[in-house]
Amino acid sequence: MADHTTDYLIIGAGAVGLAFADTLLDEDPDCHITFVDKHAKPGGHWNDAYSFVALHQPSAFYGVNSMAFPGEQIDTHGPNQGLYALASGTEVSAYFEKVMNLRLLPSGRVAYHRLSEFKGRDDTGTARIAGVLSGTEQTIAVRRKLVDATFYQTSVPSTHKRGFAVDEGVRVAASGELPELWKAPASIPEHFVILGGGKTAMDAGVWLIEGGVDPDRIHWVRPRDSWLNNRKFIQPGEDFIEATIANQIAHLEAFRQSQSGEEVFEHLERGGHMLRIDPDVTPEMYHYAVISEGEIALLRQIRQVIRMGRVTSITPGALHFGEQSHAVPQNTLFIDCTARAVPFTAAANSGPQFRGDTIVLQPVHVPLVTFSAALTAFLEVHYPDDATRNQIARTGALTDTPATFPYAFMMNLMNRGTWSQTPEIAAWLAKSRLDPTGPTVARMIAAGDPRLSALGGFRKAVMEAMPDVIRLGMAAKALHEAGLQTGARPTN
Ligand SMILES: Cc1cc2nc3c(=O)[nH]c(=O)nc-3n(C[C@H](O)[C@H](O)[C@H](O)COP(=O)(O)OP(=O)(O)OC[C@H]3O[C@@H](n4cnc5c(N)ncnc54)[C@H](O)[C@@H]3O)c2cc1C
């Protein structure tokens, strides 16, 4: 006899597991849910984030469906001026704690084993978990399904394993340590080297410049440059709906005019929809990061960019890239921003979400991970079999490059087409706060808002672009799958 019994055992109480549970509770009034998570608090990687981390998308459509973030307002100063303020890492952590403590646990239908690791499941469906601190094992009989909410394997600077060697005497810090520097005025470094080309590295660059560091005191190792979404086109609510629709139409038109994924980005850049830090360098990476024009202007001040690949080791005064080296000042602080956040090239465990007695939560609209989890819970409750559920929401690919992006875009568009023609899903989207446009459009239709006329243009653009979306999408799919077979590319 097991120590506990539940209907759904969710491994991981991060954003994705919480979004799934929140919708499941609403849609299935009878089920019991149990979480097991190694962390001490809900929210997953947000508990380990550096202090100046922030959501790069608006919080209006992040988190769980039943609870909005508090106090969403427009920034009146700084590089994000005129756009919705970004929730800080602390706010995101506090939000997920509230979701667990004020929403899920008080329902009386949720159990939460924190500081506990999932150890496996036997043939009878009974799972084993072990306390991280106590080592004590417990068993949980799972009546319905095991839900794996760890697919994204999010890695952050404070917990990732460094992929390069460091000699004694070399100062390396995670970005989270930067705000501590003021405490030791005698050891403020003369120089800074940012390692990595992803969003964490960009956050570190903005933080240093806003903190008054002369950009000439900064080197930036960028193995790959990245295309970045312009935040002014990714904003919630009625006031931004025309820009949001214009952004979607611009994507569709770019597909019509392009022969490759790379060309799609060039078209989007001309309309200001996509940004890059260095206009002279063609980005080789696209991870859906969102940035403001103000942040780009700050980052362009860093002119000492080293593009020699990934660092293999650091010795006093020198960075090494295999056989090649690059000198830097002796008194340098190296800021390690090489954690890969989401493993865009990992294929492990990908496939359909619904697998008999297991659900593996994955993106069904890339990159909306919490939205995808919530919709998956809706499908679990309202559709009778796995084949139908998997057909209605096909898993999207976490593509890594501009060349492979059309594959993810095509999958998003195909899923969206299915959902818009399935009345019960369309009705659910219209009230789902995690859908960037659903509730806004529903409110505007109810109010007869004339700004919605832009939607007519969007529908026409979809019809016209669909053959090109499929043309580029299928070619990109082949590239993506070939890339997975030949091994992962570096991600940052
Ligand atoms: C700095 C940063 C900013 C981001 N910003 C955005 C954004 O603006 N918008 C967006 O959509 N996405 C963003 N992302 C992507 C991000 O990955 C997701 O938003 C989301 O937080 C991931 O949640 P998760 O639940 O998948 O993973 P996690 O937060 O990693 O949670 C997984 C949980 O599973 C637990 N776990 C794993 N294995 C086991 C086991 N065997 N037993 C028990 N527990 C286990 C872990 O302890 C962890 O708590 C960002 C990512 C990073 C790193």
Image: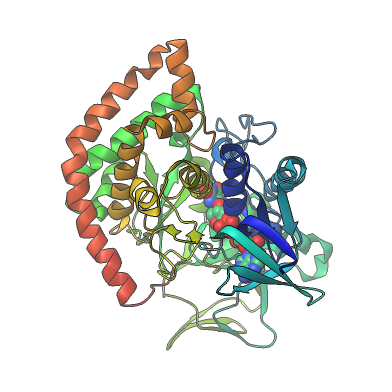
Residue 9 showing in the rendered view: yes
Image point (46%, 14%), residue name: 446
User: Residue 67: x and y, percent?
Assistant: 65, 36
Residue shown at the point (49%, 22%) measured from the top left: 238
Relative to 374, is 3 on the left or the right? right
In the figure, residue 464 lies in which quadrant? top left
Dividing the picture into quadrants, the one containing residue 141 is bottom right
Residue 448 vs 227, above or below: the answer is above
Q: From the viewer's side, name the closer residue of 348 and 263.
A: 348
Total numbered badges shown on the rendered structure: 0
Residue 188 against residue 410 in the figure, above or below? below
Q: Quadrant of ligand 1?
A: bottom right
Extreme residue in the front direction? 1
Colour convention of the picture? rainbow
Residue 291 horizontal side relative to residue 169, left or right: left
Give how far across and how far down residue 416 sits, in percent: 34, 39
User: Residue drawn 26% across and 48% down?
Assistant: 264
Where residue 97 appears, as percent x and y from the top left, is: 74, 48
Q: Is residue 219 left or right of residue 116?
A: left
Residue 477 is situated, as x and y percent measured from the top left of the image, at 26, 60
State the quadrant of the N terminus. Answer: bottom right
